Image: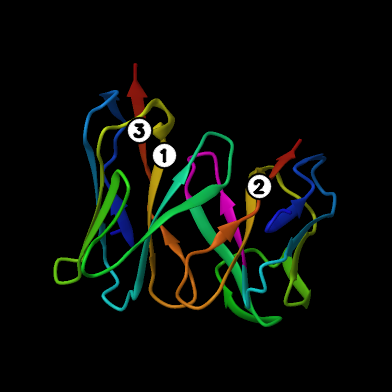
């Protein structure tokens, strides 16, 4: 009965590959997010979608492309992976002024 | 200056101690405020929202001072299970802005 679920949990891949991370929420929230947590544990917003529309796109390389087929899903596609992309990626969702709920994270390792 | 700043920590306290976390934020347009906890290798989990009048949830008390742009979290009678990183979060618009976190270790 997971509220925000993302897959895969672990992803190990070689430099130059293209990979996707999927996220789904069953909370009925209107807004979904992708956050990146680097090795220093700092959580930084990458993208935010509200009702399938992009509302925040921080300074993220355009190798990263979010896709929201409907308001319950927000996927992240990454092209031409680089070593510096290694991090934990968290999907989250929220409604109005309430707090956000996070998925369990995807630990991406680029070798 | 970072948008959200917190005590650098770590805090090492004995069981039963009272511990206070401090946080300041720079964006005066922030409307919503939260404390999250994050356990090692886990996702951040919402601990509590923070309201202007201050609010309490069991052993946890949160305070907000909008004039000083300051948020605090007090944990009373700390338990071993309180060991985690505590993240101060503000929401100036659509985005949740996280502080760097303060690590707490409660020792037996």
Crowd rating for badge 1 (residues with CA inside 10 Å; few <14, some 14–19, many 20+): many
Vertical placement of residue A75 versus A95, above or below:
above
Residue B63 x %, y %: 22, 59
* Residue at x 55% of width, y 69% of height: A58
Q: Give the colour scheme shown.
A: rainbow
Of residues B4 and A16, the one nearer the viewer is: B4
Task: Name the side, left or right, on which B71 lies relative to A2.
Answer: left
Contact between marks 3 and 2 (CB within 8 A): the answer is: no
* Residue at x 14% of width, y 71% of height: B67
> Between marks 1 and 2, how big is the CA–CA gap?
16 Å
Residue A13 x %, y %: 82, 40
* In magenta segment, residue A38: yes
Contact between marks 3 and 1 (CB within 8 A): the answer is: yes
Name the residue beneath numbered marker 2.
A104
Residue B88 x %, y %: 36, 54
Instruction: Tell me the subunit letter for badge 1.
Output: B
Residue B100 visible in rendering: no
Vertical placement of residue B36 versus B55, above or below:
above
Q: Which residues are magenta?
A: A33-42
The quarter of the displayed image where residue A48 is located = bottom right
* Residue at x 29% of width, y 53% of height: B5
Residue B85, which numbered label? 1
Q: Earlier in the sequence, mark 3 or mark 1?
A: 1
Residue A47 visible in rendering: yes
The quarter of the displayed image where residue B42 is located = top right
Judging from the image, what secondary structure is the residue with disc 1 in? Answer: strand
Crowd rating for badge 2 (residues with CA inside 10 Å; few <14, some 14–19, many 20+): many
């Amino acid at each position: 009965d997971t509220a925000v679920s993302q897959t895969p949990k672990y992803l190990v891949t070689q430099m130059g590959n293209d990979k996707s991370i999927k996220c789904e929420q069953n909370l009925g929230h209107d807004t979904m997010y992708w956050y990146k947590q680097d090795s220093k544990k700092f959580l930084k917003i990458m993208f935010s979608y509200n009702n399938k529309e992009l509302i925040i796109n921080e300074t993220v390389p355009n190798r990263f492309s979010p896709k929201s087929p409907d308001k319950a899903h927000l996927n992240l596609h990454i092209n031409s992976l680089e070593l510096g992309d290694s991090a934990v990626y968290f999907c989250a969702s929220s409604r109005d002024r309430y707090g956000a709920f996070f998925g369990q994270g995807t630990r991406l390792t680029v070798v | 200056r970072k948008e959200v700043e917190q005590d650098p920590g770590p805090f090492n306290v004995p069981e039963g101690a009272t511990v206070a976390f401090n946080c300041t934020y720079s964006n005066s347009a922030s409307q919503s405020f939260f404390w999250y906890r994050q356990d090692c290798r886990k996702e951040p989990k919402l601990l509590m929202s923070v309201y202007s009048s201050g609010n309490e949830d069991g052993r946890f008390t949160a305070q907000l001072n909008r004039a000083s742009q300051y948020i605090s979290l007090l944990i009373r009678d700390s338990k071993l299970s309180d060991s985690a990183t505590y993240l101060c979060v503000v929401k100036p618009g659509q985005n949740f802005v996280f502080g760097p976190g303060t690590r707490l270790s409660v020792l037996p």
